[in-house]
Amino acid sequence: MTRQRWSVSLRFLTLLLILAAAAPLYLLLNVQARGEQERLLNDAKQNLQAHLARIQRNEPLHIDKAFQIVNAFWNSVRENGVERAPAPAQPTADSLDPALRPDPDHAAALAPDPAPIPTPDPTPAPTHPPGYATFYIVDRDGYVLLASDDGQALEGQLLETLSPIMLEGWGGDTLCMGTGNCPAHNTQAFVVARAARSHDGSALPETILLFLHESWFQTTLTSLNLPEGSYLTLWDPRLDPVMWSEPGAEHLCPALHSEAQTLAASLHNGSAVSVVDCGHTEQQVLALGSIRDSDGNVLAYISVSTPLAPMLAAARGRAVAVSATFTGAIVSIGIFSWAAAVALVDRPAEELSRAAARLGAGDLSARYSGPRWVKEIGGLADAFNVMAGSLQRRTRELEQARFLDTYPGVFNAQYLDVLEDRMKRPPAHAEPDPSTEICSVIVADIDGLRTVNERQGREAGNQIIRATAHILVDVVGDRGYVIRSGGDFFVCVLPGCDEEECRRLMHVIRERSEAWPHETKFSLGMSTRETATISLSELVNTAEGRMYRNKFLHERSPRGSMLHFLRRALAEKTHETEAHSQRIHRMLTALASALGLPDSDMDDLALLAMLHDVGKIGIPDSILNKPAALTPEECTIMRTHSQVGARIVADHGELRDIAEAILSHHERWDGTGYPRGLAGDDIPLHARMLAIVDAFDAMTSDRPYRAAMSVEDALDEISRGAGTQFAPALVEAFVRVVRASSRQSGENV
């Protein structure tokens, strides 16, 4: 018992290779997606740090410059005494750009006389829209000595929001006091204090207070061009939030506050970044930096926070886009690789395997004729074809040695059994192979060979057999095998030959036989199978039956001699001539072609054309040739000719179908015909066709009792009989055929 080995389909292996090649690409895709998220997060952190660095670079300089302007003006006031000096303008766009741009509606002016301290006007100072900054110069007790124009009404007043205790000990260069209420505008502002200094740099007893309003903060935010959804937060030195860039941003402070304290502990002069979970699945990227004065003192902390979700969404979007691109590329490459592998390797391998299976099953003509794009498959195919050719030649040599007939290229009758075994029906479960199913057979029998042997001797008959064998071998060639199964009986087996090709070969054989200078003719028959359900012996029997039927067409054959004798006798006693049979045959063949009937019907129609009126041999001459109309009794006798002819033809078993058509060719479509009163489709098709053709030929031919009709008149008469005497569909086809033939030839059919 042969042990079955485990095997894998080549297509399955191709698929595994494609998947194995695609897997690393998908892993790389996942790594790239994660790297894209990290890259976007790092970019966001770096951008936030860059924004903070810009604030850290600019804001201390702006605040210092504002202090310098106010300090210089204060020194001028002190030096000039009671003389009024022009008040310094609020910081301009040129001096404080961009963080401390002044409001053009607020002019900078000073009170004309700082002493004595005027009594405050009970009328409140008019409230003006706050500018970017408001400054005050206060003494150690907190009294206002000088104020900007929108705070002049407070000069000489005590700033209640500033405790004298807070002012004690000032002397540092800069001190951030955090948030405070601006007395002039009653609005929350960011307060920065610095001791006033003289021209030589010595500390003065007065303190300069700079109130930075929210508009300063908004200007700073606008200049940063932060990402959408970002918030800017200002923290005092104690890391308490002071200002926010957007209303409602306060809800982030609880989550950001602890993280800001953690980040502030690690700060020096730079910034730190962290991702903060703000709850409700909301995450923020927080960047914190410090704002310091020129001495390094922390004025405030400032932070920028931006939501993480858009960055992750962008990363996912890029990942999806990249994934789609890679997936499309992988799928395209996979499909192309699969198609290439199947076309270049798999299908050629399958075809080569099928050819090998055919060779193993005994089909020695099996060859590989598929593609050879792959060098190794091409080499294997060449080796297989060489092997198959050698095996076929060797087998032929062995077969010829055993089964060769006395005539070159012809096998003996025993070789039919060899071919029968080789072409046995496959098992029901076997997969059909169309290349081995189609097969045709041509049988050939020599008519008149016995007469030649009797008159000229057996050697003359052998020469005719030799000439017949030569014709068959020459026509068949490598297409099949020529077998002599009897003295004058040949069988040509044509594997892979369809019906059309077989009929062409039979036509060539008939032409070659009619051209030779012998007194004999060939009777030929053919048969074709399209599936392997028909055995070779059945094919030979079918072809042989058709050959014997065709013998009736040959006068030299024993079967045809009697019928031809009857035909000659009928022609002598009636007007029925060979020309009439030929016209009937020609029109029947044209009508059959128009109806699309198979070629196998053509031989039957030829016999029907020749034998349809053979029964008239039994009708008295007085009735057949009577120039006047027949009496009812004579009509009854005349109608018996179809029955007589059918009995004559039916004696030959091969002609039973022809006999049935002869018996029925005077039946009418409406059922009023004879002899059986058949109607419609119950009338055999060949009989329906013959009824139309015979009637047309009778009308267009001269008769003893009338002259011939014209073709058009006859066609009109045939058309009037459609549906009563003749089948309507056949009449329509016949009229088309006759008129088309008349137009082509210019003559009557």
Image (spheres, rainbow, N blue to C red):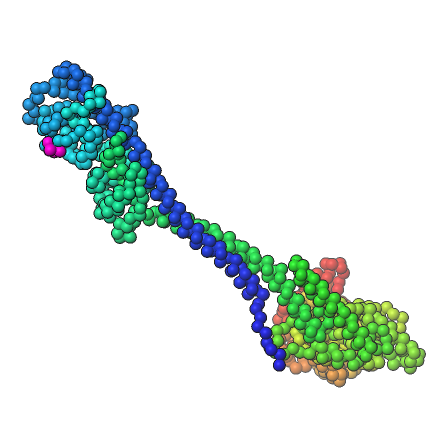
Quadrant in the picture for the C terminus: bottom right
Which of the two residues, 489 or 169, is positioned nearer the viewer here? 169
Query: Magenta residues?
Result: 161-166
Q: Position of residue 118 (x, y in %)?
A: 7, 21
Which of the two residues, 307 or 358, is positioned nearer the viewer here? 307
Decide if residue 237 is in sight here. Answer: yes
Residue 225 location, quadrant: top left
In the rendered image, the vertical position of residue 531 relative to residue 383, given as above or below? below
Decide if residue 590 is in sight here. Answer: no
Residue at 75% from the left image edge and 81% from the top image edge: 417
Give yes or no for residue 62 being in the magenta stretch: no
Residue 286 located left or right of residue 624: left
Residue at 62% from the left image edge and 71% from the top image edge: 723
Residue 88 location, quadrant: top left
Which of the two residues, 185 or 691, is positioned nearer the viewer here? 185
Residue 530 location, quadrant: bottom right
In the rendered image, the vertical position of residue 69 relative to residue 665, given as above or below? above
In the rendered image, the vertical position of residue 537 relative to residue 19, given as above or below? below
Residue 325 located left or right of residue 251: right
Q: Where is residue 425 in the image (x, y as percent from the top left)?
A: 66, 78
Residue 589 located left or right of residue 404: left
Q: Position of residue 711 (x, y in %)?
A: 72, 64
Residue at 26% from the left image edge and 53% from the top image edge: 280
Quadrant in the picture for the N terminus: bottom right
Residue at 46% from the left image edge and 53% from the top image edge: 28
Q: Given the current orientation, which residue lies at the most extreme right position?
A: 456
